[in-house]
Image: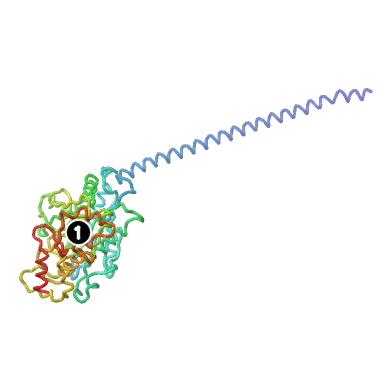
Amino acid sequence: MPIIRGAYQSRPLHIMRLRLRLRLRLRLLRLIQRLIGCAVLAFSIALIYLQTTIILSATSFGSEHDRNSRRSYGRKRQGRRLIHVVSPFVTKNDTSLFAPLSDEQFAMLVSIKNAQEEFSNNTTMTSTTSGFDSVLLACAVLSDEYDTLHDILAPYCQRINTLPRHTGTEYPKLLPDTKLSFLQDIVDAGTSCAEHNDEDFYLMLTNADICLTSNFYTELSHDFARRKRKALSINRKVLSKSNLDMSSSLNDGQSTPHSAAMEIWQQAHVLIDEDKYRSHPGYDCFIMHASVVRSLNFGDQFVGFPFWGINIDFSLHIMAEGYKNVESDGTSWGTYHLGNDNKRRPLKWNPGDEMMTDWKKFTKEELAYLAWCPLVGKPPQERITLQNVINCGKWFRPAAANHTSLVLPAFVNEGYEKVYLENSAKYLNCTSEGLPIVPWRGLSTPETRQNWIQKWG
C-alpha cells in the first residue's frame, strides 16, 4: 500500500512540470509568432511606403515632363496639320557650292527649316489661336533625279516623294529638252502625306525657290484661326542679289551649302527689316484646306511657266470660302525670292514682235483650246508657254457637249458643282458659244483669241 500511495503522490508533480514546460513553449511560440507578425507588418508598411514614394515621384516627373513638353511645343502633338510641298530640281550647268541645287533652292530649304523650328518652339499657340498644329515639309522630285537629290534633301524634308512624269516625257517631240513638273502631280505628292482618313489639313504649295520669313508659319496659323479661311495666296518680296555679300563664305574653302545658305538667310532678314526689297505681282504660294483641294482638278498645267499661278488664284476666288491674296510687302511676314530670274525658263516669254513660228508646231485642234483660256492677255510666242495656255483651255473647257446653257469648267470636280454655281457669277461670264469671259483688266476676249488662232495657227 505505501508503494501505491507514493506513486499516487508523485504523479501530479510530474504532470505539473510537463504542463509548465508546455505553457512556456506555447508562450515562446506565441511571442515568436508576434515578433514575426510585427516584422512582416513592418516590412509591409515599408514596402507600401516605398511603392507610394515611387508612384508619387513618377507622377511628379510625369507632370513636370508634360509641362516641359507643353512649353517646348506650345500645343497638342495631334491636331490639324499643314503639309507644305515643294518640288526641288537639279540645276543644269551649275558648278557652285550649292550644286546640284541652286543657291535659291538651298536658301529655300534653310528658310523653311528655320520657320519650322520657330513654329515648334512658339509657346503662345493654343487650340483657339492656331489654324494648324504641326508642319510637314514634303519634297516632290522627278524620279530620275531622286538618287541625286535624296541625301541633300533628307535633313530638311520630312517626306521625299517621286513624281511620275514631266513635260519631257509627256511632250517628247515638242518639249524634249524640258523637265517641268505637273501641278496635279505635286498636289498628289503633298496630299499623300496626310494621315489615313484625315480630311482636315492644309496643303501649301510654293515654287522651289521661294523662301519664308522665320515667323511665317506662326503668323499663317494665327491668320487661319482668326479669319476662318479655306485658302490664301501670298505674293513674294524680291530681294536684289547685289545687296547680298556671299563672297567670303563661297570662297573660304570651309563653308558647306548649309552654312552658306544660313548666311544668305541671315542677310535676307536684315534686308527685309530694312525694307530693302520690292513687291512682285506673281502667284507662287498657295495654302488650301483639304476640302478645297478635293474640289479642284488641276489638269495638265505645269509649273515654271504661265499661267498656272493666276489660274489657281482665279479658281480659289470661286471655290474657297474666305479666300484672299496677300501681298508680302504689306506684312511683317511672308515669302521672298533672291533676285528675279528663273533658271527653269530656257526661253523668254513674249519677247516682242517676233514671228509666231512655234504656233505652227501645234495642230488646229490643239490651238482651238486656246480660245477657252480666259486669263491670257497677250499671245504667247514660244512653245512652252503656248502648251501651258492650251492646257489652261482644257482646264476651263467643260467636258459636256452642250456649252450654250451652262458652263461648268473642267477644273470643278464631281460633287462640288453647287459650290461653283453659287459663287461663279461675279467672276465668270460666257459667250453664246460658251467661251469663258473673265471681267478683269488686261485680259483678252474670246474673239481676240480666236483671231490669234486664225492668224498664226
* Quarter that holds the C terminus: bottom left
Q: Is residue 51 above or below residue 24?
A: below
The location of residue 110, given as percent across then percent down, is 22, 57
Q: Residue furthest right?
A: 1
Which sits in the foreground, 223 or 54? 223
Q: Quadrant of residue 88?
A: bottom left
Tag count in the figure? 1
Please say whether residue 88 is visible from this viewpoint. no
Q: Is residue 8 above or below residue 297?
A: above
Which sits in the foreground, 321 or 447? 447
Q: Is residue 44 above or below residue 389?
A: above
* Quarter that holds the N terminus: top right
Colour setup of the view: rainbow
Q: Residues within 10 Å of mark 1 (few under 14, many from 20)?
A: some
Q: Is residue 302 left or right of residue 376?
A: right
Residue at disc 1, secondary structure:
helix
Residue topped by disc 1? 312
Q: Quadrant of residue 42?
A: top right
The location of residue 256, given as percent across then percent down, is 22, 61
The location of residue 379, given as percent across then percent down, is 10, 68
Which sits in the foreground, 293 or 285? 293
Q: What residue is at 18 percent from the left and 51 percent from the top?
A: 324
Q: Is residue 197 left or right of residue 266?
A: right
Amino acid type shown at disc 1: Ile
The location of residue 111, given as percent across then percent down, is 21, 55
Q: Residue furthest left?
A: 353
Which sits in the foreground, 377 or 428? 428
Please say whether residue 161 is visible from this viewpoint. yes
Q: Is residue 399 above or below residue 421?
A: below
